[in-house]
Image (cartoon, rainbow, N blue to C red):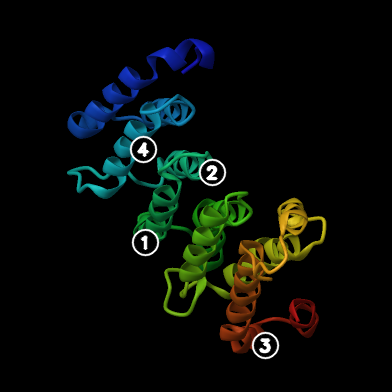
Amino acid sequence: VKLPLSVTASLGTPLASCIYHIAKTNTQNICTTSGWHTLMSILESCARFPEPAPTIGFAALQFLITQDQSVPVLNPETFAVFLDALYLYASTVLPCSKSACDLLYSLTGRVPSMCSAEKSDTQDDSSRKEWLEYWSPILLAFSQLCRDERGDVRNHAFGLMESVVRSGGPAENLTIFEKQMVLNTVLLPLARDIFDPDGVLASRSSLRRRLKSEGDSDHSPEDGTRLMAMSIVSRFFLQNQKLFVKHLSIEDTQELW
């Protein structure tokens, strides 16, 4: 893990294959949080190696998350390192990027069981802990992927995040505090960035306008991204409007409007 990338790149494929073998056969021997941190650090390094190391590394990561284990490898102590590894595979230009987004989405289904395993003194403490340790990192990861330069990855991430926060989605039972945070720290900053003339889509839109030939369609992938940003913000606010009006101050409600 500590060797320079230029040195380890030549060892990428055998290293990734070794980690894949460990994931398939010997995870029960990884008994400490530091052990999982080391394993995830190696898998993150594999994402930066030439192919086929990233594909093998992602296969190992996928196996660890999706396969039933006698002792679950995904728990409150390992959640953050798995999330970091998945985000790296999703945000790096790799064939498995959208599959990594899908695995990132699957983590949302694990949050309730991990929260139930951790007891807090009060409901407010529990809500804030759940937000800080689970929902905020997941949604912020998705919001960064929604800014990805690759249109297919960007729009795929938008679709998955909308599935998380929509009515009936994994985040439906968030508290009023958590839902307010979703808007204030995730969705509204993302929408502002998407619609900002100098934001994440600016360079791509400008290039497309310069290359646009006469007779081409006026629609672009960037237009689709802006539509998705507008949709996810408006839908989330409207489906929770009654909750906001009931529990928030007039000033906070007006600020959201």
Label ID, residue 245: 3
Residue bearing the label numbered 2: 91
Q: First in sequence: mark 4 or mark 3?
A: 4
SS at badge 3: helix
> Left of 149 or right of it: where is 168?
left
Q: Is residue 4 visible?
A: no
Q: First in sequence: mark 1 or mark 3?
A: 1
Residue 206 place in picture, x, y as percent = 78, 55
Residue that appears at 51% across and 64% down: 161
Label ID, residue 243: none
Q: Are marks 4 and 2 in contact (CB under 8 Å)?
A: no
SS at badge 1: helix
Q: First in sequence: mark 1 or mark 2?
A: 2
Residue 209 place in picture, x, y as percent = 76, 59
Q: Nearer the viewer, mark 1 or mark 3?
A: 1
Residue that appears at 52% across and 51% down: 133
**Residue 213: quarter of image:** bottom right
Q: CA distance from mark 3 to mark 2?
A: 37 Å
Q: First in sequence: mark 3 or mark 2?
A: 2
